[in-house]
């Protein structure tokens, strides 16, 4: 992409190592998104079929032990256990972005961080405004965080269907924004949706967490050492009343990225190994291809036939969530990016326009996985209002996808030309020509 010597630029092409990492991550997430859509569709069809009672029976089947409230239904295991893997990968991503990725540079980090933050605050305000205007009560307002999340796998599945040749700058922006969004979401869950906090198990969780950190720092990554520690951390945090997915983020954040001068002789890797990258490479397929689709299968099975859809539309929560996802996300992400550019006197890269940012902002309104989780925490899994929230998340995500499709499809020919430039190699050295020829732009400050 072209760079201007006179202006600071935002949404410029990332470095080649960063672009390579983004491409690899998004390939896995795209496949995971297709599996996510299939799982959600299968759950919807089963829950609205004549055999819907069998779906409910499977979802509510309890397995486990009584200690630490670990005798859970399959649906709860999916929400508390499977999504912990998802958030572990998110923690690894955040750690790498902070230490060796674009987030290590405050100037580069400003755009996705501000966009993500505004993409959380504005949908929450839109939700609250709609619910209050329609006469909703305090119980309805507990769902304020439902429309604040972005589902990167679902969004990429939509892009795959559209056949979009989204350029690397927008892909990197979308992925980084989604990582920041996930961290904000897990913080919201920990702070606002924790009931009956038990300090003893929460403090005890620090012991296996610290041991996990010590072993990974010393590159002692043997599974028979780390898995019991990770399981103990997860179990103790679950017993404390804090949502167990928080354990996933904490475990991911203690995994080392930078090299270490010396490691014990019996370590599995040398001190130069980026353990976070190795874990992310191995666990991202498990997260995107198994954990998230399993959660979607147990969470998306809401019954809409027999008057269920009409009843849901009469709930202020539903309109609030839909408005938050479709309107709030666009205003928040687009507005945050635009205001940051105006305040810093920065300009978009010459190959992009604000219409591209608007399309990407609409895409962030696809809030599926974490939105469904927050709905369960806000209203109680299996409750009538939880069912309404699920309908709203599905409807809002579909509408946001439709808006994004309209905007991005109009630009697809332009993206295709940019994409050809980004993959063209004249010397077959594995690095596209544009990443060698393009001078580094002046960073935003």
Image (spheres, rainbow, N blue to C red):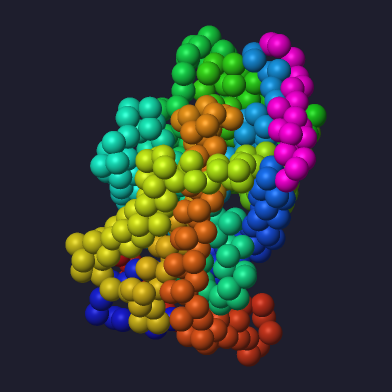
Quadrant for the C terminus, please. Answer: bottom left
Q: Residue at x 56, y 13 (%)?
A: 201
Image quarter for residue 211? top right
> Is residue 348 in the magenta section?
no
- Vertical order, 411 against 151 (above or below): below
Counting from the top left corner in percent of width and height, residue 217 is at: 62, 35
Residue 52, located in which quarter of the rendered image?
top right
Closest to the observer, 315 or 272: 315
Q: Which residue occupies 77% across, 22% down?
A: 63
Query: Could you tell me if residue 361 is visible in this image?
Result: yes
Magenta stretch bounds: 49-67
For this rendering, which residue is in front, 226 or 371? 371
Residue 91 horizontal/vertical position (percent):
55, 41
The correct choice, above or below, for 361 with respect to 100 in the image is below
Percent coordinates x, y for residue 260 in the rendering: 60, 42
Q: What residue is shown at x 46% (from left), y 18% (from top)?
A: 195
For residue 161, side relative to residue 189 (left or right) = right
């Amino acid at each position: 992409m072209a760079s201007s010597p006179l202006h600071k630029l935002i949404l410029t092409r990332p470095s080649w190592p960063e672009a390579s990492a983004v491409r690899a991550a998004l390939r896995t997430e795209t496949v995971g998104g297709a599996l996510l859509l299939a799982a959600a569709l299968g759950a919807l069809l089963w829950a609205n079929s004549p055999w819907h009672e069998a779906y409910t029976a499977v979802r509510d089947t309890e397995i486990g032990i009584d200690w630490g409230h670990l005798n859970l239904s399959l649906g709860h295991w999916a929400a508390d256990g499977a999504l912990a893997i998802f958030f572990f990968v998110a923690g690894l991503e955040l750690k790498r972005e902070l230490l060796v990725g674009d987030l290590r540079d405050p100037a580069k980090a400003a755009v996705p961080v501000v966009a993500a933050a505004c993409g959380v605050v504005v949908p929450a305000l839109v939700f609250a405004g709609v619910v209050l205007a329609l006469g909703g009560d305090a119980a309805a307002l507990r769902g304020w965080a439902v429309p604040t999340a972005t589902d990167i796998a679902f969004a990429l599945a939509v892009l795959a269907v559209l056949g979009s040749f989204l350029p690397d700058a927008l892909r990197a922006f979308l992925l980084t924004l989604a990582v920041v969004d996930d961290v904000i979401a897990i913080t919201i869950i920990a702070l606002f949706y924790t009931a009956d906090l038990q300090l003893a198990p929460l403090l005890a969780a620090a012991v296996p967490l610290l041991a996990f950190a010590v072993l990974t720092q010393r590159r002692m990554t043997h599974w028979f050492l780390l898995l019991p520690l990770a399981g103990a951390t997860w179990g103790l945090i679950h017993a404390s009343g804090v949502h167990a997915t928080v354990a996933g983020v904490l475990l991911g954040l203690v995994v080392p990225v930078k090299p270490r001068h010396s490691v014990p002789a019996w370590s599995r890797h040398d001190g130069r190994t980026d353990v976070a990258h190795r874990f992310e490479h191995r666990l991202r397929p498990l997260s995107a291809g198994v954990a998230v689709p399993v959660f979607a299968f147990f969470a998306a099975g809401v019954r809409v036939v027999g008057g269920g859809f009409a009843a849901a539309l009469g709930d202020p929560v539903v309109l609030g969530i839909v408005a938050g996802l479709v309107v709030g996300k666009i205003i928040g992400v687009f507005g945050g990016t635009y205001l940051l550019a105006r305040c810093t006197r920065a300009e978009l890269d010459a190959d992009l326009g604000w219409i591209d940012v608007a399309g990407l902002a609409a895409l962030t309104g696809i809030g599926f996985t974490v939105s469904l989780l927050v709905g369960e925490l806000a209203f109680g899994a299996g409750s009538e209002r939880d069912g309404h929230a699920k309908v709203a998340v599905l409807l809002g995500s579909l509408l946001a996808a439709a808006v994004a499709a309209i905007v991005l499809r109009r630009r697809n020919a332009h993206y295709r030309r940019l994409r050809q430039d980004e993959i063209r190699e004249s010397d077959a050295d594995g690095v596209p020509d544009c990443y060698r020829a393009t001078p580094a732009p002046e960073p935003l400050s």
